[in-house]
Structures are given as C-alpha cells and as structure tokens.
Amino acid sequence: MEDLNRYVCLRNARLAHQSDGDADISSTNTTLDELLKFSHRLSLQVTMVNSTSSESSQASNGQVQVVPYPQYVRVLDEIPALQDMEWATIREKSKLPDIPVFPSLFQYSLIEKGVEPIGRGRDVHKFRSHTLHRFIRLFWNQFVKIPSLFADINEIFSGLADPERFGMSVLEFEMDPKSDECLVYLMVGRHEIPLFFIHYIAPHDVSAAQVKGEIIDLTFDKDILRRGGMQSTLIATMTRAFARMVSTGIRYSVLDTGEAVVFLHGHSTHPDLLGAHKFIPCEEIGDDVDDKVYQTIVAQYLSFIFRAMREKPSTQHWYATAGALRTCKLTNNGVERIVQSSNFLTPSSRNDPFFADSNLLDENGRLFCTHKCLLGLCAGAELDHACPNYEEHGNRFHEIGPTQLIEFLYRQIEKQDPPYAFRPMYLHGQHHHYLKGVLDDYGYTFLVKAVEPGHEETLGREYNTYQNLEAVQGFIIPVCLGVLDLQERLNRCHVYYGREFEKMMLLSCSGVSPVDFINKEAVDTLTKEREKLKEDIEEMGLLRPDVSWRNLLWNEQEHCLVWINFVEDKSSD
C-alpha cells in the first residue's frame, strides 16, 4: 500500500507539473553544476523551529563526562583553496560536470516540496538524508565509472581482498540509534571503510549566529580552562566530537545544524591539535550561486569525503599519545577544568559496538601471498612462482619457516610503530577483525585474525582445530602460520579503533565472498561445490559443520570453496 500511495502521489504531481506547461523539463536530466545549485537552493529554504519536547542532541543527556580536550584549535584557512583544487581536478580529468546524468528538475521539485522544518538533531539527519546524502550517492555512482578521476584513491584500495569491487562501491550513512551521530563509510565488496562522523545538532542548541560569532582559534588551557571553563554549547559539541575522534582513530568529523556546518580534522601526528572550518551556506554564498557551485554544501561534503579517503592511518604511537591527553569536565552546555587528569580510554569506550566496522588505509597495496606459497613455507618446499611476492622469499626454496617468521615478526613489531606490521583490512566478524600482516625483510603477506578482548579462548580452540586439520590446510581450509601473543611476549597490544588486541592468528587469504560470483549460471555449480565440501568435512570427523555462505570464500587460484570461521564462539551471548 505504501508503494501504491507513493506511485499515486508521483503520478498526480507529474500531471500537475505538465498542466503548468513544464512537461519538457520533467524528462530532461541535469548536470552536476545544476545539481549543486539545486542543493544550495534547498539550504536557503530550510526553516528552523524550537522543539520543546525534543530529546537532547547530545549523547550525555545532561550528565557530566570526563573527556580529552584539544590543546590547540586552529582555523583551517586552506580548506577553500583545497576545495577549488579538488574540483578543478575533476573538471580537468573528466567531462562529468557537463554531462546531463543526474535527475530531472521535476524530481528535484518533489524533494523540495517534502522539506520539513528542523527542530531536533534527528530532524537535521532527516533533512540531510533527502537533500544531501541522496545527492552525494548520485555523484558517487558516476564518479566510480571514471577510474582516472582519482587514480590515487584507486591505488589506496588496490591491496584489498576485493579490489575489483571498487567500481561497485557505495557510500553509506549509518545513524547511531542511541544518539544523533552518524558514521559515513564506504562499502567496497565486503570491506567497510569508515571515513568520518557527522554530529547532528538541534539549531536551538547551536545557532548559526553562534557558529559565526564564536572564536574557535584558541589554546584550550589558556583561553578556556584557566578561566574556569566556558559555557558554550559549540565548544562542548566540538570537544565531544574530538573525544570521539581520538578514541577511535577516525580523525575527521562534521558538526551539522542544517543551516551551519563545522568541518573538523584531527592532526595526523599531534592528537592534541584540532583543525576547524566553519561554513554557513546562506551567508557565505547567498542567492548568487553561479560562480560558487563548488563551495555549496554538497560540494563541500564531497571534497571532505575525498580527503578522508586519502587519510593515512593512525599509528600506535598516535593512539598512545591520544590516550594520555589531559581531560576536562564536559556537559551539554560547556566545559570545565578538572583537578586531576585521567586516562579517558576506558573499557566501555573500547567496546563501543557502533565502531565495530572500522577503517584505516593500507599504503603500499601489497598483494597477499598465495595458499600454495604459505603452504610451501610451512613445508620448506619450493617457491610458488604464482605468488606476487615470491622474489622476496628466497632463491628457489623458502629461506625461513613459520617459527622464524613469527620470531622475526615479533622483532619487527618491537622496533616499528604498527600499523607498519599490521594494516587494517576493514573486515570483521562477530568478535574478531582482519588485518593485513607483512614481514618486511622477506615479503610474506598474510591475514591477521585479531580477536577482541574476552574472546581469546575461542581463538585458542580455533588454532587447535587448525593443528588437527593440518593435512587439508591450503585446500579445504586456510593455511595457519601460528599465533601471536603481544602482551605475553612484548608487554604491549595492538590498538585498532580504540580496541586493544593482544592475541591474533596468522592465516593465508582464502579469497573473496562466493556471493559475488553467484549468478544464474554459477549458482548450481557453487551449490554442488558446497555440498561436496560439507561431505569432505564430515569425513574428517567434524559433525554438523556450518557451511553457510557467510563461512565460505571462493579461491580463484584453486577454483574451490574454502571453509572459514569453523569454531563457535561459546563466550558470546
């Protein structure tokens, strides 16, 4: 019924539109510039209302929190120039801005008629969903069809397990059900790559006038805390966003009230430095948008996305420095000085389920070693010339074995600042995350399955299963190279988006999700392969194996299915 009602409304609107003599524009697509102009027109038309019954825009609900604060807040004066360069590159490398591939003006008019007043943070999210997120996705769908536009972005993702899926990637805006916070991330095949947070703020909490008039180029200790604090909802909101950034390693964030936006960027080497750029579309652009289309809200968000995708990973040294930042008292209305600092990375913040899908970027795009290569490493066999890294492994035979690999890896981790040892893969299971491991001196590249705190016993059982199934490693199941215990050996852990991982298992990369290959021709073949795999597993004495598609991967080299995640986590609820 909802679909039928929507169809009737659209049909009536089209008939009314045609009766006004505007039938031609209803079927004529628009260009990128026209899309940006229309998005700006929506920004001018939005109205703000007070909402006395609204829930607070802030997650703390009036409670005092102890959070880290940025020692220095600096205005990002270079942002407009960087945006101009970004869009100049797009115009130079593609004809996209001039091709009419976006929806017609008629469709835009329907969006315009559906704009509702904003009174709460959730209203801002609803408004942006219809008028900004939708347009950004439209652009992204065209952007991925032109790989030459941003070759550097393609190179960043070339080392993923599903690199060919970049052309089918999608941008997602995931709202936290418990707060007015949204996580923006990129879906590339199975990979979920978070880019930045959006904090939606009720306009009566932080007005456009406050954003415009308040000084944000300051030194926190000298300008705020030494004077006893500051009753400012804007400073409070910025501090809350900053705490989220440093506790997760996602160093980009946006404060959005619907009529004013503040773009935030945490420094890559100094966690106590926060950059901020204020933008109020109605005042900075006004009605004359023709010469400023690439400064409109959609254009600003898009350039922010591009910069976030190019961001280098937060190192373990960065996390350690961020965890030792001085702290202050935070309320919805401002910040106050506290007598004694405390480490804000508490267990509760480390186990925030909203950030289970996490992101960092792999810099070198190194490909994984093959099954046969790592199987040969375990057996001391000849090198696999099909392995993309075989020239670094030795002359004819593997020069080291799995025991030496683990020993050398410990030394490498001890000397280096990960993630040069471990690079994120943006893949996760129920209680584990996959990273990419590289032994630099020998070029071995493998998966690292890092288990979350409290689930180490499951990893131990899985490792024992691998040892019992040694004969079928590299065929039915991945190759297992061993287990690392960073806490026991090095008295340290690996921090991954605010979570501390001590134990991890080294595996071969088995392939890609079979779902990507299931089509009308392949579904019968893959189903038969799965039945055969199940029979082989049962012959090994394993009863009732879970061979659902989520526990299987397709190995293109061996043209077979590989079973993963075959140990049940008994510690989970």
Image (spheres, rainbow, N blue to C red):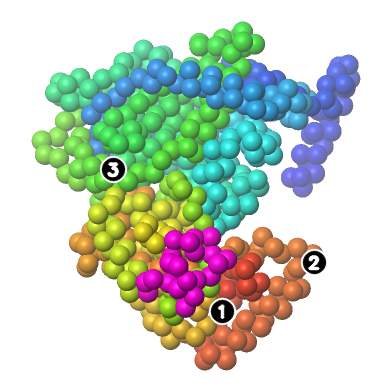
Q: Is residue 180 left or right of residue 518?
A: left
Instruction: State the residue at coordinates (47%, 71%).
Output: 396
Q: Is residue 481 magenta?
A: no
Above or below, comparing residue 288 to residue 475 in the picture: above
Instruction: State the residue at coordinates (32%, 69%).
Output: 406
Q: Are marks 2 and 1 in contact (CB under 8 Å)?
A: no
- Amino acid carrying label 2: it is Glu
Task: Point out residue 82 in the picture as x, y percentages from the top left corner.
Answer: 48, 22
Q: State which mark lies toward you, 2 or 1.
A: 1
Q: Is residue 425 left or right of residue 562?
A: left
* Along the line of sight, the residue nearer the viewer: 182 or 178: 182
Q: Which segment is the magenta one? A: 381-402
N-terminal of the pair, mark 3 or mark 1, is 3
Above or below, comparing residue 446 to residue 335 in the picture: below
- Quarter of the figure with residue 265: top left
Q: What is the spatial separation of the Cα atoms under label 3 and label 2, in whole angstroms?
A: 49 Å
- Quarter of the figure with residue 226: top left
Q: Is residue 156 left or right of residue 22?
A: left
Residue position marked by numbered label 2 in the rendering? 521
Task: Point out residue 412 in the picture as x, y percentages from the top left corner.
Answer: 29, 58
N-terminal of the pair, mark 3 or mark 2, is 3
- Amino acid carrying label 3: it is Trp
Instruction: State the residue at coordinates (47%, 84%).
Output: 469
- Quarter of the figure with residue 487: bottom left
